[in-house]
């Protein structure tokens, strides 16, 4: 009953990690080429408009995949609660 949530959640985590790694690679290459400004010592983040197009693509896909993973986890928990309630009655 919970296998679809588990399998889809694993796939979402793999997708999130893949896109996060590719975002880091693309971002470092853009920094090395001088296209993306370097962050200051006190602020480690860049704003959305300061990223390259490819970096925005991978970052957006990574955030979507993490959201899908957490949604699937929540769906599995809700399904477990509903199944426990239905089996109890």
Image (cartoon, rainbow, N blue to C red):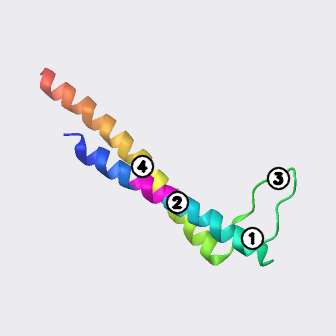
- How far from the left and from the top, in percent, is residue 21? 57, 61
CA–CA distance between discs 1 and 3?
14 Å
Q: Residues within 10 Å of mark 3 (few under 14, many from 20)?
A: few
Along the polypeptide, which appears first: circle 3 or circle 2?
3
- How far from the left and from the top, in percent, is residue 62? 52, 60
Quadrant assignment for the N terminus? top left
Q: Label for residue 50?
A: 1
Q: Residues within 10 Å of mark 1 (few under 14, many from 20)?
A: some
Magenta extent: 12-17
CA–CA distance between discs 4 and 1?
27 Å
Along the polypeptide, which appears first: circle 2 or circle 4?
2
Q: Is residue 50 above or below residue 67?
A: below
48 on left or right of 23: right
Q: Do the numbered discs 4 and 1 sit on residues whose CB atoms are within 8 Å?
A: no
CA–CA distance between discs 2 and 4?
11 Å
Q: Which residue carries the number 3 mark?
A: 43
Q: Which residue carries the number 2 mark?
A: 62
């Amino acid at each position: 009953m919970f296998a679809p949530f588990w399998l889809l959640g694993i796939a979402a985590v793999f997708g999130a990690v893949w896109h996060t790694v590719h975002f880091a690679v693309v971002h470092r290459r853009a920094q090395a080429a001088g296209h993306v400004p370097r962050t200051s010592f006190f602020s480690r983040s860049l704003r959305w408009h300061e990223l390259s197009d490819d970096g925005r693509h991978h970052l957006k896909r990574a955030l979507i995949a993490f959201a899908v993973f957490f949604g699937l986890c929540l769906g599995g928990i809700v399904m477990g609660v509903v199944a426990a309630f239905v089996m109890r009655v």
